[in-house]
Image (cartoon, helix red, strand yellow):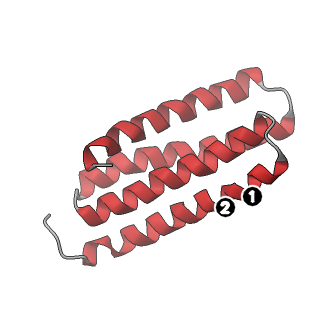
Amino acid sequence: MTARYLPSLAALSACLSIAVGAAAVHGVTDPLAKGWLQTGVQFQLPHAIAVFALLGWRDTPAVRGGAWALLIGSLIFAATLDGLALGAPRWFGAITPIGGSAMLLGWLWLALAPFVPGRR
C-alpha cells in the first residue's frame, strides 16, 4: 500500500474505535466483553491519532514504516479483542499479542527513524 492510504486508514481506525467504544458503553452488558472492547479502544484510538502526529513530524519512508506498524498492530490488537467480545472462540485471543508486538515494533522503529538517512 502506498503512503497516501495511511492517513485515510488511520482516520477509519479512529472512527471504528469510537464506534466500538460507544457500543461498549451503551449496548454491552457482559462485563468481560465490555472490558475487551474498552481495552481495544484504549489502544486503537491513540495509535490512530499518533499516525497523524508522526506524519506531521516527519513524513519520510522510515517514519511511514513505523506508522504502518502502529496502525496495523493496533487494528489487529483491537480486532481480536472485539472478536472475543462478539463471541469468537477463546483461541482467537492468542492472535492479540501479534498486534501488541507490531505496536512495540512500530515504536522501536520510530525511535530509530531520525537516524535513518532520508529526505526531511
Secondary structure type for disc 1: helix
Q: Is residue 8 above or below residue 52?
A: above
Q: Closest to the observer: 80 or 70?
A: 80
Say left or right for 95 vs 5: right
Q: Position of residue 8 (x, y in %)?
A: 35, 36
Q: Residue at x 45, y 72 (%)?
A: 108
Q: Is residue 90 above or below residue 29?
A: below
| Residue type at the position of mark 2 | Pro
Q: In the rendered image, which residue does mark 1 sit on?
A: 94
Secondary structure type for disc 2: helix
Q: Position of residue 70 (x, y in %)?
A: 46, 56
**Alpha carbon distance from label 2 to label 1:** 7 Å
Q: Residue at x 62, y 45 (%)?
A: 78
Q: Position of residue 29 (x, y in %)?
A: 84, 26
Q: Residue 65's quadrant in the figure?
A: bottom left
Q: Position of residue 107 (x, y in %)?
A: 45, 66
Q: Closest to the observer: 53 or 105?
A: 105
Q: What is the number of the mark on residue 97?
A: 2
Farthest residue toward the top? Answer: 26
Q: Is mark 2 in CB contact (under 8 Å) with mark 1? A: yes
Quarter of the image with the C terminus is bottom left
Say left or right for 98 vs 5: right
Task: Mark 1: give few (<14), some (14-19) or many (20+) Cα within 10 Å.
Answer: few
